[in-house]
Image (cartoon, rainbow, N blue to C red):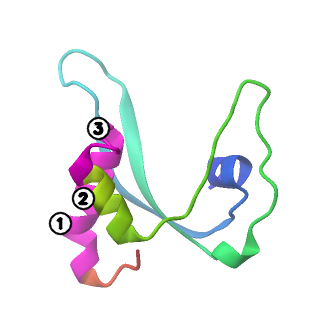
Amino acid sequence: MRELHEETGYEATRATLMTTITSSEGFMDQTAALMLLHFDERKRQAPHFDTDEFVTAELVPYETVIDWVKTGRINTAQALSALGYYELFLKQKGHQK
């Protein structure tokens, strides 16, 4: 929640841990927590970056995100895992996009 606020200016009203993934079983012990964050897009504040950070945040429709996955514009393991987990386990339970 802190990182979202610092890097995008949005303040999460609710955060849910979807799952935790590993980058490569047996090779690395690095994990990533995949979070579902809820926020009010009308309440954006100025972001506060660390001196070595640069982040561009843009809200796009969920359908656009799915199109970007299909065309390869989004291709990181974390993003694909988060979207897949959301589609398989949360979307049908009524969680908002």
Asked if residue 73 is among those painted magenta in the image, a careful observer would answer yes
Q: CA distance from mark 3 to mark 2?
A: 12 Å
Q: Residue type at mark 2? A: Tyr
Residue receiving disc 1: 88
Q: In the image, residue 65 lies at what x, y percent?
A: 36, 60
> x, y percentage for residue 32?
39, 38
Residue 63 vs 46, above or below: the answer is: below
Per the rendered image, the range of residues in magenta is 70-92
Dot label at residue 4: none
Depth check: give the residue in front, 95 or 47.
Answer: 47
Say whether marks 3 and 2 touch (CB < 8 Å). no
Q: Amino acid at mark 3?
A: Ala
The kind of secondary structure element at disc 3 is: helix
Counting residues from the start of the chain, the first of labels 3 and 1 encountered is 3
Q: Amino acid at mark 1?
A: Leu
Pointer 3 local density, CA inside 10 Å: few below 14, some 14–19, many at least 20: few
Q: Quadrant of the C terminus?
A: bottom left
For residue 85, the mark is: 2
Which residue has dot 3 on it?
77
Instruction: Tell me if I can see residue 37 in this picture.
Output: yes
| Residue at (64, 76) in percent of width and height | 40
Crowd around label 2: few <14 · some 14–19 · many ≥20 (10 Å): some
